[in-house]
Amino acid sequence: MKSTLSRLPVYYCYVQDRLKEGQEYISSSVMAESLSLNPVLVRKDLASVSSAPGRPKMGFRTSQLLQDMKTYLGYDNYNEAVLVGVGGLGKTLLQYPGFKNYGLDVVAGFDVDEHVVGQIVGGKPVYNVSKMEKLVKRLGVKLGIIAVPGPQAQGVADQLVASGIKGIWNFAPAHIDLPADVAIRNENLAASLAALSKLVSKE
Amino acid sequence: MKSTLSRLPVYYCYVQDRLKEGQEYISSSVMAESLSLNPVLVRKDLASVSSAPGRPKMGFRTSQLLQDMKTYLGYDNYNEAVLVGVGGLGKTLLQYPGFKNYGLDVVAGFDVDEHVVGQIVGGKPVYNVSKMEKLVKRLGVKLGIIAVPGPQAQGVADQLVASGIKGIWNFAPAHIDLPADVAIRNENLAASLAALSKLVSKE
DNA sequence: TAGATTGTTAATCGATTAACAATC
DNA sequence: TAGATTGTTAATCGATTAACAATC
């Protein structure tokens, strides 16, 4: 179940490309072949998200399938997030163009550094962290991104939770303790690259 | 097996923090509790990486455990990578300070845009993509990072493979076809945030 | 000794794969 | 019809959890 969800974005990109190429139907078996996945797996995944059944010999209608995935993945819901820590990574995420295709918008940044506070980065204002609780509550934003150094992550997380945030995307290499009703996803870029590196050098 | 590997970086951060606090021993059960994981799971994971067995009533020696994880995860091996696509995200990754703690170094960037070619970003030179194959071969680098727009990802990947790259970290939202002996790890930032967003709005 | 904590063996669970029937 | 492709049911596999014995 969870793994289906992790494969769907991959399918999504693939189907999107096929649609752009003007392909009217898409077959699960061809897709499985292209993505190097087990065909039964893809078939099952598609069956679980598609509103219309696939047609033998034809496959799935490309546009319909794409729309179904979009709905299923929530890409057609508009969602806002705020970001804390407008350093190198933070700035990139504030102006990252990729989010908008996924119905996402990072609406504001927060930092303690007076050099960045007051700036407009990628069209988004940067405020002092002291204003966070009040502002986030008023905006009703439920997603927070943490891009501060490790040691400050827990403190920032606590503030975000106090501001009403219900989901945190954490880029700081640190474990964060949270109430059970707040979801967290940890992103350790360095560890990810290191894992790949390990994989490569093993061979 | 694979999942143990994905949990280890989390343990690593945790153990590192405990060491900094001067804690001499660390118990798997306490750690499991803190990280909200099943204690047996943590015990098994630790048993599989630790060189010295944990001592009943005491736990594992913090410094020893950290060292074992470091070795196991390959954080004590020095590895180099090159990056293609020196845009917003690419620049961030070129100067990302977090890599060095994991034995990683992004040594150079490549781009087609003459405005960035020739620049020094985060102390790393940016070259024209046309020089990539020759240079990467000479440097003997085996890891490549793709931070170009989706439609260009496949082409860049092909060039990287031709340059002798054996592992690719792909930030472009596109599927990439590769020879079997080249490892790939896809990172779709927008999809990751969208997944978190879905999780939150579901409740 | 008693209690905390580890390590191991068996049971459970979920996800993937295999086999096959159904359909355009 | 024949063949490609889907959908479904059963078998396999791996990872997680439960139960318990071992040890400081």
Image (cartoon, coloured by chain):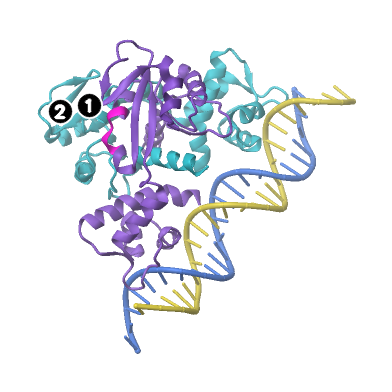
Chain colours: A purple, B cyan, C yellow, D blue
In the image, residue B194 lies at what x, y percent? 39, 41
Q: Which residue was labeled with disc 2?
A: B127
Q: Which residue is at 58% across, 35% downward? A: B45
Q: Chain of mark 1?
A: B
Q: Which residue was labeled with disc 1?
A: B108
Label 2: state its secondary structure.
Answer: strand
| Label whose residue precedes the other's in the sequence (2 or 1) | 1
Which quadrant holds the C terminus of chain A? top left
Q: Is residue A166 above or below residue A40?
A: above
Q: Which residues are magenta?
A: A94-98
Quarter of the image for residue B109 reads: top left
Q: Does the magenta stretch mainly form a helix, a strand or a loop? A: helix
Q: Is residue B52 left or right of residue A82?
A: right
The front one of A60 and B150 is A60
Q: Chain of mark 2?
A: B
Q: Amino acid at mark 2?
A: Tyr
Residue farthest along the left direction in this orientation: B114
Q: Which mark is residue A21?
A: none
Q: CA distance from mark 2 to mark 1?
A: 8 Å
The front one of B190 and A122 is A122
In the image, residue D2 lies at what x, y percent? 33, 84
